[in-house]
Image: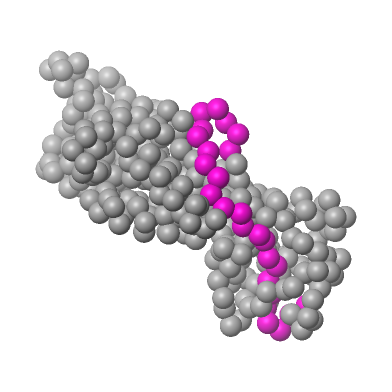
């Protein structure tokens, strides 16, 4: 067998298996039989003397070598999709797959809704994570665009500001501070906070603001998502902080009226600078500009 001649099909089988978490799922995605996928991968491993996956029954997990190869195949097949997108755009019929990464649904969902109005044949997927996760996925070619709440100063990244998002403090409705018509920053220091993990921009901005104001807060528990913070506050574990955009009205919770103006975060949309002109990416960015203009 000439591996030079047959390398692309082998790599496509490998990449799909890594992407979908198994050979059966990869076979369905590529329209092939599962034994064909298995044979492609076995051929790669045997010819080059490498192990690409750890096999655990029907489940597979990338080896260290497999992860390194996946970084390359991800770029190869992302470029293939970009080429297909460009050719279809020439016919005015956007098709393909758009992979988004976001720190929460609140900004990205309206963007997707508007984008789908004009691009109904584009498959859109969204993965959630904190800001550092979003940036990492964009740089690793695992996402086309990211939506987060801070500016990314990296020459590889194209960063588009979207909107300002003021922060607010909230509490369980029976919390002592919830009984007051308004509170001061210094009042917050007497109570525990439910905080986000270190990768949270919202938490970092709020902590920096308090430090500059000379206010030190106490944390009772650290949570990995906004939803988890909300439930912890609703369970009486402490106060919470979130952007106004992400706050969900809940009969168990109340917003606190803080006398001092609280800081804001700024949502941004990012993509790799080298991919900002790819038709699907550029089309999504146009939606971002439209929504920003409409919001004033």
Residue at screen point 26% across, 26% down = 45
Residue in the picture at 32% in, 24% down: 50
> In the image shown, does 7 or 56 lie closer to the viewer?
7
Q: Please report the residue visible at 31 percent of the width from the left and 55 percent of the height from the top.
A: 116
The front one of 30 and 185 is 185
Give the percent coordinates (x, y) of residue 30: 17, 41
Residue at screen point 84% across, 58% down = 216
On screen, residue 164 versus residue 95, left or right, reads: right
Visible residue check, residue 60: no
Q: From the viewer's perspective, is 220 left or right of 77?
A: right
Residue 154 quadrant: top right
Circle count: 0
Q: Nearer the viewer, residue 42 or 257?
A: 257
Quadrant containing the C terminus in the rendered view: bottom right
Residue 16 vs 101, above or below: the answer is above
Q: Residue 235 location, x and y as percent?
A: 63, 77
Q: Is residue 102 magenta?
A: no
Colouring scheme, one of rainbow, by chain, secondary structure, one colour: one colour
- Relative to 119, say whether 32 is above or below: above
Region in magenta: 152-177
Q: Quadrant of the N terminus?
A: top left
Residue 47 showing in the rendered view: yes
Q: Position of residue 263 (x, y in %)?
A: 72, 56
Where does residue 66 sit, x and y in percent of width and height?
36, 31
In the image, residue 176 lies in the stretch drawn in magenta: yes
Question: Relative to 96, is 1 on the left or the right?
Answer: left
Q: Main secondary structure of the magenta part?
A: strand
């Amino acid at each position: 067998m000439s591996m030079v001649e047959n390398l692309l099909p082998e790599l496509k089988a490998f990449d799909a298996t890594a992407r979908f978490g198994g050979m059966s799922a990869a076979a369905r995605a590529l329209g092939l039989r599962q034994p064909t996928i298995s044979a492609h991968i076995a051929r790669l491993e045997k010819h080059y003397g490498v192990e690409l996956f750890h096999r655990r029954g029907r489940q597979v997990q990338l080896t260290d070598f497999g992860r390194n190869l996946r970084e390359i195949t991800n770029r190869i097949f992302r470029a293939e999709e970009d080429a297909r997108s460009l050719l279809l755009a020439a016919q005015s019929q956007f098709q393909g797959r758009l992979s988004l990464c976001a720190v929460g649904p609140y900004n990205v969902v309206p963007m997707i809704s508007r984008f789908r109005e004009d691009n109904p044949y584009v498959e859109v997927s969204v993965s959630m994570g904190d800001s550092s996760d979003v940036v990492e996925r964009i740089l690793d070619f695992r996402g086309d665009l990211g939506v987060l709440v801070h500016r990314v100063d990296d020459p590889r990244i194209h960063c588009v500001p979207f909107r300002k998002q003021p922060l607010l403090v909230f509490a369980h409705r029976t919390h002592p501070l919830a009984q007051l018509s308004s509170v001061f920053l210094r009042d917050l220091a007497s109570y525990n906070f439910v905080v986000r993990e270190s990768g949270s921009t919202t938490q970092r901005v709020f902590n920096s603001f308090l430090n500059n104001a000379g206010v030190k807060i106490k944390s009772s528990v650290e949570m990995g998502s906004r939803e988890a913070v909300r439930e912890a506050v609703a369970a009486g574990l402490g106060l919470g902080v979130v952007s106004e955009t992400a706050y969900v009205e809940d009969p168990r919770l109340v917003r606190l009226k803080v006398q001092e103006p609280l800081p804001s975060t700024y949502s941004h949309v990012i993509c790799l600078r080298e991919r900002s002109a790819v038709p699907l990416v550029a089309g999504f960015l146009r939606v971002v500009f439209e929504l920003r203009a409409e919001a004033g």
